[in-house]
Every structure is written in structure tokens, then in C-alpha cells.
Image: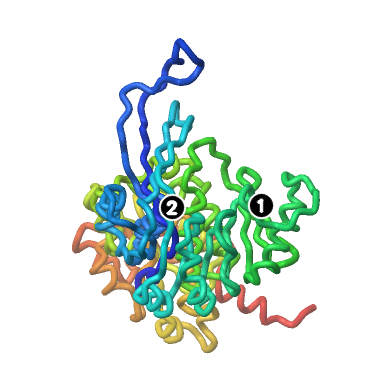
Amino acid sequence: MTGPAPLLAVGDALLDRDLAGRAERLAPDTPVPVVDDHGDRTRPGGSALTAYLVARDGRDVTLEAGVGDDPARRELKRLLDPWVRLLPLPLSGDLPEQTRVPAADRPVARLDRSDGRARSATEAARAAVRDAPAVLVSDHGRGTADRLRDVLAARPPLAWDPHPRGGPPAPGTRLVTPAEKKVRPLAPADGTPRRDPAAAARDAAALVRQWQAAAVAVTLDARGALLSYGEHPLLVPVAAVHHGDSCGAGDRFAATAAGLLADGALVGEAAATGFAAATGFAAATGFVGAGGFVGAGGAGALPRPDAAPPPADGDDPFAVAERVRTAHGTVVAGGCFDLLHAGHVGLLRTARGLGDCLVVCVNSDASVRHRKRAGRPVSPLTDRVRVLRALACVDAVAVFDEDTPARLLADLRPDVRVKGGDYAATDLPEARLLEEWGGQAVLLPYLDSRSSTAMLERAAEPTR
């Protein structure tokens, strides 16, 4: 399996600072919180945060942004160096800084410094856009997207996160991801109260036409997200309402959605997963990845950029297994052949509960054809892998070409091998192999009357 597709991020970089500390009292002369023992923590902001999140997902990413040669720019470059390649554009003025002063986990003030804007586009930056396999624009209204607008129009981005102070997305952009509060000044006014979901749907449809975009996904905070292709909008509900710091949630949404689009996902899948990544609960991965962003504390809770990077491909089955083994966890390996049905899902969920990660071993198309009758597989390998990776209980997917996964298991060396169906332990072709490293075979039943073959036979029966 190849790794995640690379991305080129284009937009306005900022340096963010958090003056975090304890807020346990009010000032005696005025009713404002007193922040004691505060520390000054810097982190990437603006398009630099979006690019950093893309890199945290295990993707190769290059950032085009306006930067100068001031102390803020040097600090930002230090933070990005382990993660992101920076392709600078000339900047008028200093790199903008935003300093947030939180109290009791809520920002009470923000101090902005400098209003530097991208001055021009270099030929290297234009060439990078033309040659990039996938482009994400993170517009914060400071000129970078405008300086590259002509080449972006000729090479429409996969995703564009707009700002009211910036220009419109390039025509042909596949997915535009504004927040509702940003849509109001962008959409044509019709006098309808903007907290009305119907009004949000009309705004989104108007923006699809106005921007000539393929789709617009508007985040509605606790009410979910609304995806519009111009009519008949799709409402994506929020999985869980969090009251944490939402700083950077839009960047998380755009970064996840753009990455999925680069991997070949449909717009609806990318928008729904991106929204879940920004609002849902985080998995127990040891760092804030593509899930649970707001619930985990937003941008302020991200791992320090100077921390050690995770494995290059967060979905690589061998990297996942090694990480779990290093933490003295249990690696579980399961299997799935062709049509994913309720029996498979039940088995996979049970299998994940037996350990600390689940790697699903999947037959390649050639392997399925060799084992099954003509016409199989019904779903090609790319589709089967995408569906499995979307399951919360699946940590990674590994593909094998042989009739059995014996060679793959010998490399993976799982602690538990789960098999579904009517087997005796002695019938498992790999049972003896597992004994070589102390692995254990576990048999789990499918749901009654659930099998891919039976489903296909019923589908082929004449209508009665």
C-alpha cells in the first residue's frame, strides 16, 4: 500500500502565542481574571497550522506563504522545520503574530502584532502550484492566495478555506469549507436570520453558484455541518458536543478533508470525516491526530512541533504493530475478503477488544479471484481498503497476494490472530506458524446467515 498523497498548502502563515497560566481570582481594581505563572508557548498559526496538521497526519507537505526575515519568521521556521517544507513568498512588513491570553481554558484577550501581507509571487511558487498533485488553500486574508490567483484558477485546488477579508476561491475548487460566521459576510443578504438552518442552506447554495465551486461545506458549530452542491443539501450531524477551545477547528477540518480528497475520496466522505475530525472524540493514539480536535483542547493542546515525529505513515500496519509492541501492548490481526457485511463488522469490533490495535489482513484482487468463483471480488481492493479504514475499530490494513496470509503474518507477528467462521483451531493454515512467536489463534463466530456468498446468491435470485 502506498502512503498518503502529498499536499501543497498555499496561504497566510502566522505565529501564534499562548500566554497560558492559572486564573483563580479577579483583579481588585477591575473585574478581569488575573493570570498567574503564565508561560509563553509558540505554535504555527494560519496556513502554517493547517500545513502542520497535514504533516501530523503523516503526509508530505510543502507550504507556500509570505514570510519576512524578522524574529517571528525565524521562530516559525524553527517550529516547522521537522515537519513542513517552506516555500517563502516576499512579505511586506513583519510576519503577523497573534497572542492569546487564556483563563480557565478560555481566551479572554488576543493581542495582534503586525499586518504583514504577501507582496508578490515568485516563479518557483507558481511552478510549485502547477506541478503539485493536490493543492489546499488556507486563506487568512493576507494576500498569498490573491498573489497566486491566476495560477490557482488554472490549477483549481481540492479544498479552499476562505476568509471574509480574502478574495473568492478559484472557480472549479472541489470543496470550500467556510464556517457559518464567515459565510454571513460572503453570501448575498436576503434579510433572513442567519441562525436558521434553511438560511444557511440558501447561503451555501448561493456560494456554490457565486464561487463556481463543486461543493461548499459550512460548519454550523453544535448543529453539525451542511454540505451543498447547489441544491438538496446534506446535513452532517455532530457526533458529540464539546465545550473546549475551538481555535484551529476550521484548519483541522480543511486539512483532513483535503487529505482525503487527495487520496481519492468522494466529497461527501471527505466533508463528513473532516467535520468529525474537528469535533469528534480522539482515539487513544498518544497524540492528537485526525480526530477529537476540539474535544482534546484545540490548537493549544497540540503536541509541540519540536517533539519527535510519529512514523511516516500513520496507517502503515508494521509501524502500528511496532508502536503497540514498544508500549507492551497486544497486536491483533483479523481478516476480511470481499463484501463487508454485518458479520464482518461484529467480528472486527470484537477482535479490536482483544488487544490494543487491530490490523486487518485483506486479500488482493488476484487472491480473491483465485479463491472464489468467477465474478469475485465484487468490490475492488481500493474500495475494500477504504471502507475498512473508515471503521473506528480498524487501526491499519495490510494486503497479501497469496491464498493465505501466512507470509504477511510472519512479518507482522501478531499476538492474537482472529478468524471468523466454522474452523477448529487445528484447521487454521497459520496455526502452527503462530506458535513460533507465541501467538494465539482465536475463533469468533459470524452472525447467523451472514456471508458474502449467501448475499450474492440472494441478490441473483429472480424477483418474486
Structural distance between the alpha carbons of marks 1 and 2: 20 Å
Residue at 68% across / 55% down in the picture? Answer: 235
In the picture, measured across the screen, residue 345 lies left or right of residue 423, that is: right
Q: Which mark is residue 46?
A: 2
Q: Quadrant of residue 18?
A: top left
Q: Residue 122 at x, y = what percent?
A: 37, 72
Residue at 34% across / 58% down in the picture? Answer: 67
Tell us which disc is closer to us: 1 or 2: 1
Please tell me how crowded label 2 is: few (under 14), some (14-19), or many (20+) other residues with Cα within 10 Å: many
Q: Residue 28 at x, y = what percent?
A: 45, 10
Query: Which one is nearer the viewer's eye here, 270 or 368?
Result: 270
For badge 2, the amino acid type reads Gly
Residue wearing tag 1 = 185
Please tell me how crowded label 1 is: few (under 14), some (14-19), or many (20+) other residues with Cα within 10 Å: few
For badge 1, the amino acid type reads Pro
Q: Which mark is residue 37?
A: none
Would residue 355 be seen by someone viewing this image from the given angle?
no
Query: Which one is nearer the viewer's eye here, 464 or 109?
Result: 109
Q: Residue 217 at x, y = what percent?
A: 62, 59
